[in-house]
Amino acid sequence: MELGWSAKKHLTNGFIHLLMVLGSIVMLTPFVWMLLTAFKTKSESISVNPFYVFPEHGWHFENFTEVWNSYNFLTLYGNTLMMIFLRVLCACLTATLAGYAFGRLKFPFKNFFFAIILVQMMVPGQIYIIPQYLIVSKLHWMNTQLALLLPGAVTAFGTYLCKQGYQSLPASLEEAAELDGCGIGQRFLFVMLPLTRSSLVSLGIFTALFAYKDLMWPMIVCPKTEATTLTAALSRLQGQFTNNFPQLMAGAVMAVIPMLVLYLIFQKQFVEGIATSGGKL
């Protein structure tokens, strides 16, 4: 007996929902495993028994206290959040100004300078580490927030994203503002900038995520524990020959908390920004 259109639609929707549930389980499994491992003993964490999932000898909260006492997590939280805030602020400020210039203004060698920005996007970021380190060292910025800020203060991706946003706006908006007597600064600040809010939200999201995940740069310029970030501090929990996986996972759980809280607060902006930019995390 042939299925009707409504039955086929319900069957298709059910299959899609099943795939989404299975995909969610696959993505959540590492996080659940991390959380469960944080409450185990060291011997339980390296057990090869596939059915040994939950802690057998009680939940060991001391893993969190030992890691917390070993590293000043309040300082690490402060360093990380301050770095994210400064990078997002500088990236949005420089990218929106450069994006407006490349997208709406006419000046000599505009295409040449924009081509340089595109080339910067194509080159791996690791190439800039040595020149950036020399700059930080010469300026005596080691173990400071300025050193953590340097690589993210200007972003080629943000300039490109904002340029595309400004180019998509109709020219009649600026022409009308110019007829009303607005100068270039007023046209940018009061007319064009508010209309590119979605591009700035997308840029802020990506900048915050990239700054939070940055590992190599903080390890290089902030070797002192009191000046480094969460990711760099977690890497020091790994031993040369052995690893205390429960403490390592406990530190990872505490490191995830700030971004998890920020996501829950700005969930709508996260979704809108990623959907608008057409990118992926």
Image (cartoon, helix red, strand yellow):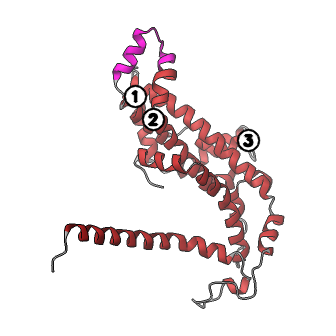
Type of amino acid under label 1: Gly
Residue 184 percent across, percent down from the top left = 47, 16
Type of amino acid under label 3: Trp
- 99 left or right, relative to 59: left
Secondary structure at numbered mark 3? loop
- The residue that disc 1 covers is 103
Residue 43 percent across, percent down from the top left = 72, 87
Type of amino acid under label 2: Cys
* Relative vertical location of residue 162 with respect to residue 176 in this rendering, above or below: below
- The residue that disc 3 covers is 141
Of badges 1 and 3, nearer the viewer stands 1
Give the magenta range. 171-187
Q: Nearer the viewer, residue 20 or 221?
A: 20
Name the residue rendered at 73%, 73% in the picture.
247
- The residue that disc 2 covers is 162
Secondary structure at numbered mark 1? helix
Name which of mark 1 and mark 3 comes first in the sequence: 1
